Image: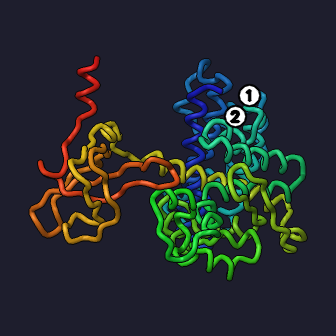
Amino acid sequence: MKPEALHTIVTARILLDCAHSACMVDDRHTASAGLVVLQDAVELFLYACLLEKGVDEKRSLENLNFNELIRELKKANLRVIKSATLKAMNKQRVIVKHCGQLADPTTVRQDFEAAQASLDDLLEQVFGKRLNEILLCEIIKNDEVGQHLKAASECVEAGKFFAALVEVRKAIFIEVEEEYCIVGWKDTPRGSPSSLLSLVANGGFKAPWYCKSKEWIEKNVRDPFDYIQLDQERVRLDLLEWGVSTQDFWNVSRLTPSVFRESRDAKWLGKGDIPHLVGAATEANARYCLDRAFALILKKQQHQDLSRRLERQGFGRFTVRTKSDLPLLEKADTNSRVVDTLPKGKDFSAECFVPGLSEPTRFVRILDGKATQSQGVYVGYVVYDDTTCELIDLGEQSDENE
């Protein structure tokens, strides 16, 4: 695939996702706005197909209007199904955008569905793949998620709609539900001391805290799927932050059967809900869930791509060597609770230097692994002055050795 065609398709897909939520409501103003965005998305898809076919190398495409783009595609021996509906959609878009008249929501919804069918057929002719399949191969960064969505797409084409719904839910489990899995806490009694390493090992970072104990799990978990304890407010905030329709997520959640795995290497388990077994396995549901799951995962990925973090290049470079056995404090305060003791003459990684909470004393925050992983880590504060410890710059030592 030509890079310029792929970039155009990605942009068009983002526009199509923006149009989807607006085109599906009954409010005339929202539907009219959705129609304008939908037409822009479709136009870009048509343009991408012409780029892939090399038509831009024979003539200029910049000044072609919507109907002329369709005409060029037909000249290139490509069929454009529902072209009459697409042209009518374009005409209505002109009326909305340039005359300020409102579109009928039912017609807009039909336009969106016709556009999807037309684009899937056109892209399959040009690229040999439907829209979701193209983007799955080129865009999704998590290979495992991409494989499940690809399997779902193949199941849809093979008419295995229930299997497609299962594959979609596996992708959703990995991207969303896994962070609410409390299975790692089933052997941890309430109130037991925990280290940073144990918290990471147990997982379920986003699950409600009250669920994370052996006692709660023994009382409330009745089958493997109860290990997923969604915090609905946290889910809602995450979806809004990613720019995903909360209704889309819950629709996919309701239409797909629950799945679970205890770890990445464990076998997938599936829940045989009677409603899913009897009524959910339809082509319409499978295609809808695949499309919405892809949109959700793509938006989450785009949100993560916006993240910027300071490189941890200096982490581990500075250590402090204790001059005596030092109390490791919970807070930057000499009256704080002692959480551990740093033995004399040992080196410990320094994370940062901070002033005291209520005194001029200076502290260094320690973050260092203990002798064995099972013992956890040293995390806390020690007083930092000439009498307690010595600062060691490992970077300078390395330079001297060179």
Left or right: residue 90 versus residue 320 is right
Looking at the rendered image, the quarter that the C terminus falls into is: top left
Left or right of 120: which side holds 96?
left
Question: Label 1 sits on what residue type?
Answer: Lys
**Element at label 2:** helix
User: Where 264 sits versus 361, above or below?
Assistant: above
Q: Residue at x 89, y 53 (%)?
A: 160
Residue 100 in picture, x, y percent from top left: 49, 63
Q: Using the image, determine if residue 78 lies above or below residue 157.
A: above
Is there a contact, CB below 8 Å, between mark 1 and mark 2?
A: yes
Q: Quadrant of residue 72?
A: top right
Residue pointed to by mark 1: 75
> Crowding near pointer 2: few (<14 within 10 Å), some, many (20+)?
some
Image location of residue 121, percent across then percent down: 78, 42
Residues under labels 1 and 2: Cα distance? 6 Å
> In what element is the residue under mark 1?
helix
Depth order, front residue of 349/117: 349
Residue neighbourhood size for the residue with mark 1, other residues' Cα within 10 Å, grouped as few (<14), some (14–19), many (≥20):
few
Kindly tell me whether residue 292 is visible in this rendering.
no
| Furthest residue toward bottom | 219
Could you tell whether 257 is left or right of 304 in the image?
Answer: right
Name the residue: 70% across, 45% down. 132
Q: Position of residue 166 (x, y in %)?
A: 79, 58
Identified by mark 2, the residue type is Arg
Residue at 48% in and 51% down: 303
Query: Colour mode?
Result: rainbow
Residue receiving disc 2: 71
Q: Which of 153 and 49 is in front in this view?
A: 153
User: What percent of the width, then of the height, locates residue 386?
Assistant: 12, 48
Q: Can residue 402 be seen in this view?
A: yes
